[in-house]
Image (spheres, rainbow, N blue to C red):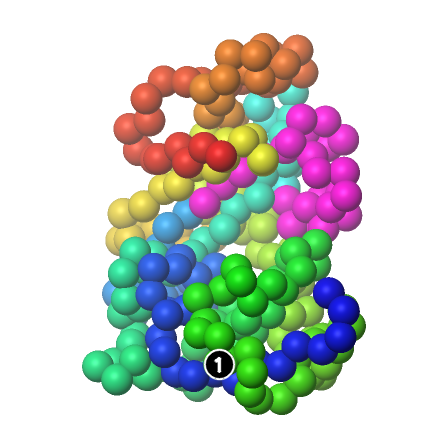
Amino acid sequence: MSGSLRFGCTGCGKCCTGHHVPLTLAETRQWADDGGQVVVLIEAFVTDGPGMPADQREHVLRRSYPVPCGSGEVRVSVTFAAFNPGRCRNLDDNDLCTIYDQRPLVCRIYPVEINPHIPLRPGNKDCPPQAWQQGPELIHGTQLVDAGLQALVHASRQADRDDIAAKVAVCQALGMTTSALKGNGFTAYLPNMEAFAAALAQVPGDNGAAWALHVEDEALAASLHDHGLLTTREPPVYYAFIGF
């Protein structure tokens, strides 16, 4: 991206509709305590092997955790997100946020991208054209201008790194131990929120549970078997496989 990019929210509420919002561990606890549903999204890769995006190596390593899989090892990335298949439960009748002062980090950061390898492209956002024709300068060249937003982006990325071990432990405690291969898809779980909240309240330790990879492509599965990894293509019962 060259030049500059401006942004001014129009209050249309589109970014709060039909989007599952990634949450930090603390935000996940709050969301669960307030009666919200959480969706758990999981993807995995082999260090410097299948699923590893070489151009994002440092980023994905820092926000992932090693787990046993077959006779090998994969690193899993886990996202806890507010489940919003429709309107966010915190939108009022005027499309205003009722928890604005306590809204999640990702909501505060919008429309900026969290992944440092994904450029901000207005065409990928739901905001109307006028949102990009008003407001203060957001990005100059490739640099985020607002120091406050820079701090929030850093805090979000740091939380990803700080929380990953606990997120994996919660998944293991609840039997959510089938992942997809990064770049091929991800697995999505809608946990029982009573059990999920109990696991969040007192995060267990890593119980060493064995993981499996949901892979439907036979050639890809064969290549993973060469790395000693356990795969499955059985129709999922407790999760959904979202393939790319």
Image quarter for residue 93?
A: bottom left
Residue 221 appears anywhere in the view = yes
Q: Is residue 62 magenta?
A: yes
Q: For numbered disc 1, what is the local secondary structure?
A: helix
Q: Name the residue carrying label 1.
A: 130
The magenta stretch spans which residues?
41-64
Q: Is residue 85 magenta?
A: no
Task: State the residue at coordinates (62%, 81%).
Answer: 6
Q: Position of residue 134 (x, y in %)?
A: 55, 87
Task: State the residue at coordinates (46%, 25%).
Answer: 214
Residue closer to the observer: 149 or 30 = 149
Task: State the residue at coordinates (77%, 48%).
Answer: 58
Q: Position of residue 186 (x, y in %)?
A: 48, 37
98 horizontally vs 231: left or right:
left
Task: State the residue at coordinates (43%, 83%).
Answer: 10
Q: Position of residue 178 (x, y in %)?
A: 45, 30
Which amino acid, mark 1?
Answer: Gln
In the image, is residue 19 above or below residue 164? below
Residue 32 appears anywhere in the view = no
208 horizontally vs 86: left or right:
right
Image quarter for residue 182?
A: top right
